[in-house]
Image (tube, rainbow, N blue to C red):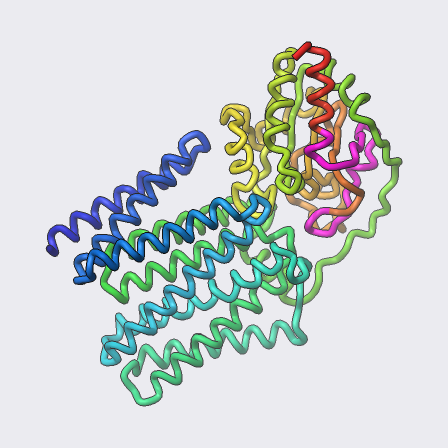
Amino acid sequence: MAGGLDLAYIAAAVAFILGLKLLGRADTARRGNALSALGMLVAVVATLLAGGIDPLWVAVGLGVGATIGILAARLVKMTAMPEMVALFNGSGGLASMGVAAAEWIQRPETGVGTAAAIAAALVVGAVAASGSLIAWGKLSETMPGRPVRVPGQQVVISAVALATLAGAAWFVVAPDGGAAGAVLLATAVAALVVGLLLVLPIGGADMPIVVSLLNAYSGLAASMAGFVLGNSALVVAGSLVGASGFILTNIMSKAMNRSLTNVLFGGFGGAPAASTAEIEGEVKPITPEDAYYILEAASNVVVVPGYGMAVAQAQHVVRELAELLEKNGAEVRYAIHPVAGRMPGHMNVLLAEANVPYEQLVEPGDVNPTMDTVDVAIVIGANDVVNPAAREDPSSPLYGMPIINVDEARTTFVLKRSMNPGFSGVQNPLFFKPNTRMLFGDGKAMVGELVSEFKETLGE
């Protein structure tokens, strides 16, 4: 049976690696997700059966878990996907904590190596769990999205972090001592507090980076839990999640011109300076009818989606508009900023759901050099990722962040419900630029009216 289990783990590891590779492209991501899920299914079933669990109970467990997963995938709205991902990250951290604690309770007389793995799984899992809970609160807007600081933030978090490390070290040295249980519990509580204090002072605009980082923490904790159990499949899976999460976090940090240290500790000592520049210009509203005439004459159009498109569920009608523009002779591209939306890849998922061709998706670096040749840039629900203050206003909290330079297009349409700022709370001078026209209203309804105008003209 041991040989069969090893073969199952090898098959699962291969599925994880191939699945991760397929996830690197939007047109193969679904297959990658399915292959990775199959690998996890093989690993879980093989582990349970090798452990002597009755196959009937294995089937029952799989049925319950599959039901919960299907309901979550079907019933949770796309706009709520970021907070659901945050909860999943937190659940992974809690599971690793439970595995580590249960293993020590069953075998308290353990070696230093296993004790170190238990402490690491407990600490990293706790940070991922409590940090993800705060991320969920900010993303779901059940708590303020702005940075929240406690009095004496620097002193408090430093003290709690040192206490966590000291407790973990004590446990590793004496895992079978009389006070080991109390030390382990105190260490777990302190690590939970560290997670809270790390994420509370981080503002809403940085939440996509935080979600990616917490995902990496969750994977790292799972890998440590694999060492605790001596389970190679869990070690491989956790390592892949952790490594890919850290790589993605680094990519997203660069996309915002921030270091990871800056994201985590930027609010450590105080609030960032607010912009003092006065926004000059006049807001110019436009009707869908007038917007149609400008689009009808365009030969080069760039669509910039954001979280507002997810809220309006406008991705399908946006794709329909793009198809009509192409029939009218225009080239259409979708410029996707790495941190658009509220989780990594949020816009890619939305557009893939609407069957937007992968070839039409471009990154800011691909479209910015030729933005001055774009006839119309259509901004749908995006805000911070097109804010020219990131280039022009050194006092802006967004200054230095690479953006999509839609203000350089010949004409820019901004679809918004109101003049409210984006998730970061920073005002956007794009709205006052002379080449910007504001199309106020529900994104799906406004794009729908543009589609109707085109269909009437094209006779469809």
Q: Is residue 121 above or below residue 347?
A: below
Q: Is residue 138 above or below residue 10?
A: below
Point 43% across, 47% down: residue: 70
Q: Position of residue 91 (x, y in %)?
A: 44, 61
216 left or right of 53 in image: right
- Residue drawn at x 20%, y 62% as measured from the top left: 53
In which quadrant of the rendered image does the N terminus lie?
bottom left
Inspect the magenta stretch and tell me whether residue 84 lies in it: no
Name the residue located 43 percent from the left edge and 77 percent from the top edge: 187
Pinpoint residue 24: horizontal percent, then vertical percent.
42, 36
**In the image, 216: left or right of 361?**
left
Q: Which residues are the magenta region? A: 422-446
Q: List x then y, in percent, for residue 130.
A: 51, 66
- How far across and down, in percent of the image, does residue 75 sit? 52, 47
Q: Height in image: 252 above or below 108?
A: above
Residue 438 among those drawn in magenta: yes
Q: Could one spot residue 253 in this view of the protein?
A: no
